[in-house]
Amino acid sequence: MVLVNLLFLGFIASMVCFIMWNMAVKQLGAVYTTNYIYIVPLVTLVTSALIIDEKITWIALIGCTLILCGVYLAERKK
């Protein structure tokens, strides 16, 4: 079972993420794509709330708001 999990993480999860990241860099460029890596904690927060029933706190919501504001400011055209 451990070997199956390692193979899944190594080949499926890592490979798919690597391919999708490279496609995003190709489409958007390195600078814009890098800004979206900051959205990972938001995805983690929502996923943990849906899958393992973790509670979303006010601090987490404030953090999400700050992250979204930062990504918006970074993506804004000058």
Image: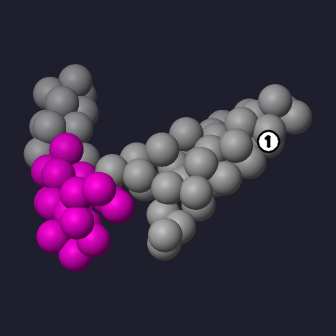
Q: Is residue 22 magenta?
A: yes
Dot 1 falls on a residue whose secondary structure is helix
Q: Which residue is mark 1?
A: 61
20 sits to left or right of 59: left
The magenta-colored residue range is 14-33
68 up-or-down from 9: above or below: below
43 sits to left or right of 9: right
42 sits to left or right of 33: right
The residue positioned farthest toward the right in the image shown: 58
Choose top left, top right, bottom left or bottom right for residue 9. Answer: top left
41 sits to left or right of 28: right
Dividing the image into 4 quarters, which one contains the N terminus? top left
Residue at the image point whose x is 58% and y is 57% from the top: 73
Residue 69 in sight: yes
Residue 18 lies, in percent from the top left, at: 17, 52
12 up-or-down from 25: above or below: above
- Magenta-highlighted stretch: main secondary structure? helix
